[in-house]
Image: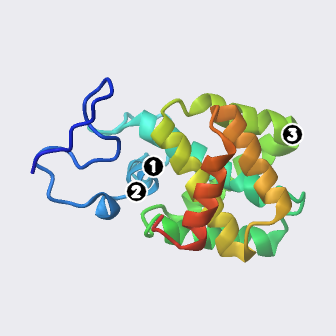
Amino acid sequence: MSAPIDRRPGGVVPGAPRLGSETPRARVASILSQAARAYSARPPIEDITMPTGFDPAAVALFETIIEASFLVANADGQFDEEERARFQAIVVDACQNLVHEKQLEALIADLCEMLAEDGMEKRVSMVARTIGRTEHQREVLRVAAYMAHASSGVSDPERGVLEQLARGFKLDMAAVDEAITQAAGHVGV
């Protein structure tokens, strides 16, 4: 299969299947599930030698995607045990059960601590600085919007955090609208 040619610099239409790829773009595993696979391979003890093929960048990407979703979930300033359990269940499901609940509990505890210490604005800024690739930035917005939508719809405060993330990524507000539309239509996570 040949990729469509685009006359812009770079030559291939963005989002077009790669040469030799028979898999439609919609069926390719999401960045979240790919990063979750790497995160789940992380040894539970920090001092252990990392296994062959371990990708620390994928682990950082996973943690950042989850942090962005966590920040959106905390947009209203409330994150009680019930909401935390619901958030965790949604993440586990979105990751196709690749991440063990204990790993996720530890990550959420760390995120709670960092948010309490740094505040929302600084954490949003840190997430925005961590994700450099536009496709990853859009995925972060999409997953965060999905998490918000799955819990009870995207509220105004949640949309506000999504907009802060988009500004930090230097994306326009159309990217937020697109992420929310995809979340409402549940275009895979």
Image side of residue 120 versus residue 89, left or right: right
Looking at the image, which is closer to me, 91 or 121?
A: 121
Q: Secondary structure at mark 2?
A: loop
Q: Is residue 74 visible?
A: no
Give the Cα separation between the discs numbered 2 and 1.
14 Å
Q: Residues within 10 Å of mark 3 (few under 14, many from 20)?
A: few
* Mark in front: 3 vs 1: 3
Q: Earlier in the sequence, mark 3 or mark 1?
A: 1
Residue 123, quarter of the rendered image: top right
Q: Say if mark 2 contacts mark 1, CB within 8 Å.
A: no
Give the residue number, with chain letter if any, for mark 2.
30
For the residue marked with disc 2, what is the amino acid? Ser
Across and down, in percent, residue 127 comes to: 66, 37
Q: In this rendering, is residue 180 above or below 160?
A: below
Q: Going from the N terminus, do you reach mark 3 or mark 2 first?
A: 2
Would residue 168 be found to the left or right of residue 45 on screen? right
**Number of residues whose C-alpha sits closer than 10 Å to that of mark 2, classed few (under 14), some (14–19) or many (20 or more):** some
Amino acid bearing label 3: Gly
Q: Residues within 10 Å of mark 1 (few under 14, many from 20)?
A: many
Q: Determine which residue is flagged by label 1.
A: 39
**Tally of numbered tags:** 3
Residue at the extreme top: 9
104 relative position to 7: left or right: right
Front residue of 16 and 8: 8
